[in-house]
């Protein structure tokens, strides 16, 4: 059985270069689980820019509060039980907090289908904040696996 190659789509998190040519600092986007040692893709939403404006500033100026509340709620939870269900080898998976954030924020915005959530992650700015800008693969298997296999839904 041939392995299917998937195109990884990522939100551009390059900061605006300064006027005199210095490069902006780049922060790592991977987080290591303290108990299993598994590395997860967990990007910080603070690193997402819309042109020269930070996404955080744009959402606040637009009066959009839900993404901040949801991300704060998710960060207050203990994810170690779910993270322990992942294999310790292979490519780093998206962090459960990002995937659950995508599902929760999507449902609250009226998007519940796997295809809808995949598109929602790419086009909705509030969703980009909640998830840190992850874009699950277009085959919907990433969202399906967290929803059914990892969370037991």
Image: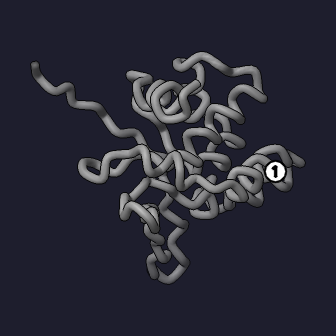
Q: Nearer the viewer, residue 101 or 35?
A: 35
- Residue name at image x 38 percent, y 59 percent: 39
Query: Residue at the spot x=46%, y=81% of the render?
Result: 22
Give how far across and how far down residue 78 sits, in percent: 63, 56
Instruction: Mark 1: give few (<14), some (14-19) or many (20+) Cα within 10 Å.
Output: few
Residue at (47, 71) in percent of width and height: 27
Q: Is residue 3 left or right of residue 11?
A: left
- Depth check: give the residue in front, 52 or 59: 59
Residue placed most toward the observer, 36 or 60: 36
Q: Relative to residue 111, is residue 149 drawn left or right?
A: left
Judged from the image, the secondary structure of the residue bearing numbered disc 1 is helix
Residue plotted at (44% across, 51% down): 84
> Residue 21 falls in which quadrant of the image?
bottom left
Q: Position of residue 36 (x, y in %)?
A: 39, 61
Q: Residue furthest right?
A: 63
Display coloring:
one colour
Q: What residue occupies the far left of the structure in this picture?
A: 1
Residue 130 location (% of width, % of height): 66, 47
**Would residue 93 be found to the left or right of residue 20 on screen?**
left
Task: Tell me the quarter of the picture where residue 51 sits.
Answer: bottom right
Q: Is residue 49 visible?
A: no
Q: Quadrant of the C terminus?
A: top right
Q: Is residue 35 above or below residue 7?
A: below
Question: Image height check: is 110 above or below 16?
Answer: above
Residue located beneath label 1 in the image: 69
- Quarter of the figure that contains the N terminus: top left
Tally the numbered discs. Answer: 1
Q: x%, y% of residue 53?
A: 68, 60
């Amino acid at each position: 059985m041939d392995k299917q190659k998937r195109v990884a789509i990522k939100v551009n998190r390059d900061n605006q270069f300064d006027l005199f040519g210095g490069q902006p600092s780049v922060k790592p986007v991977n987080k290591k689980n303290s108990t299993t040692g598994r590395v997860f893709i967990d990007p910080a939403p603070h690193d997402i820019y819309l042109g020269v404006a930070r996404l955080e500033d744009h959402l606040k100026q637009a009066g959009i509060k839900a993404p901040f509340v949801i991300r704060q709620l998710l960060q207050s939870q203990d994810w170690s039980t779910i993270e322990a269900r992942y294999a310790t080898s292979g490519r780093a998976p998206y962090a459960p907090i990002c995937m659950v954030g995508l599902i929760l924020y999507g449902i609250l915005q009226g998007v519940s289908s796997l295809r809808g959530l995949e598109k929602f992650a790419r086009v909705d700015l509030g969703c980009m904040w909640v998830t840190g800008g992850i874009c699950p693969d277009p085959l919907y298997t990433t969202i399906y696996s967290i929803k059914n296999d990892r969370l037991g839904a």
